[in-house]
Structures are given as structure tokens and as C-alpha cells.
Amino acid sequence: MSAGDKIGNMADKAKGKAKEAAGKVTGNERLESEGKVDQARGDLKQAGEHVKDAFKD
């Protein structure tokens, strides 16, 4: 996994956590849900990168 991919995946997760927290604070369920989706997207991308790395070796 390249450093750029790692940074991008971590950025997606961080953005998701921020959205989720903002949604909880403001009572905005839609924003909170979007945050959870962004976090899941980052996790899936990261898992995909791990699978690609496993097959490279």
C-alpha cells in the first residue's frame, strides 16, 4: 500500500469521524449517518489495499 493511499484512507476516516461528531452535537441524524458512511468507505478502501498487498508478495 502506498503512502498516498494510506493518507487518503485515513483522511476519509477522519472526515467521517468529524461529520459523525458534528451530527451528534447538532442532532443532525443525516450528517451523523454520512460520517459513518465515510468511515466505512475508508475502512473498505484500506481493506482492499491490504488484499492487493497480500497478493503482491
Image (cartoon, rainbow, N blue to C red):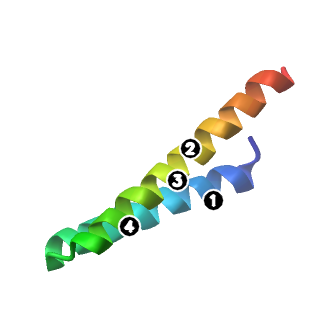
Vertical placement of residue 5 versus 47, above or below = below
Return the residue at label 3.
41
Cβ atoms under marks 3 and 1 closer than 8 Å: no
Q: Give the number of the mark in front: 2 or 1.
A: 2
Q: Residues within 10 Å of mark 1 (few under 14, many from 20)?
A: some
Specify the label residue 34 is tagged with: 4
14 or 39, which lies in front?
39
Residue pointed to by mark 2: 44
Q: Residue at x 46, y 60 (%)?
A: 38
Q: Distance from label 3 to label 1 (Cα)?
A: 11 Å
Q: Give the quadrant of the N terminus.
A: top right
Give the CA separation, mark 3 to mark 4. Answer: 10 Å
Dividing the picture into quarters, in which one does residue 25 lie?
bottom left
| Percent position of residue 41, x then y | 52, 53
- Looking at the rendered image, the disc whose residue lies closer to the viewer, 1 or 4, is 4
> In the rendered image of this protein, does residue 38 appear above or below residue 22?
above
Name the side, left or right, on which 35 lies relative to 51: left
